[in-house]
Image (cartoon, rainbow, N blue to C red):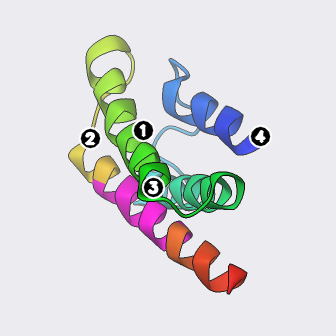
Amino acid sequence: MVVLLVSLYVLFWPDPAGGDGVFPGADKVVHVLLFATLAAAARARFGAGRAVLGTVLAYAVVSELVQALLLSRRSGDLWDVVADVTGAVVGWLLARRLRD
């Protein structure tokens, strides 16, 4: 639940904290880590069904669409979706490896 609340803040707060980040690409690192944590937590909580991973991946896409279409101070970014999906898959696989 905590990771979901953190994701809601990071993804949907109207004024993103940190701006461009501490180093180039910091935003993408945050996206990868956030979605890796989300996917791992979802797998641990709800199991390894495809629908669980699919929900995390859908959340990644929807979050960028919301930023692009509904939040005037945010922008959706295809590369953020790529980072989100990468993080989700990595987190999903790491969670599987840790459980086995």
User: Residues under labels 2 and 4: Cα distance?
Assistant: 25 Å
**Pointer 3 residue:** 53
The residue type indicated by label 1 comes to: Tyr
- Image quadrant in which you'd find residue 70: top left
Say which element carries label 3.
Answer: helix
Looking at the image, is mark 2 or mark 1 nearer the viewer?
Answer: 1
**Nearer-N-terminus badge (2/4):** 4
Which residue is the site of mark 1? 59
Q: Which quadrant would the C terminus be assigned to in this image?
A: bottom right
Query: In the rendering, at what x and y percent does residue 6 appear?
Result: 68, 37
Report the magenta residues as a range: 82-91
Q: Is residue 13 visible?
A: yes
Comparing marks 2 and 3, which lies closer to the viewer?
3
Seen from the viewer's position, the closer of residues 13 and 92 is 92
Disc assigned to residue 2:
4
Q: Secondary structure at mark 4?
A: helix
**Distance from the alpha carbon under mark 2 to that under mark 1:** 14 Å
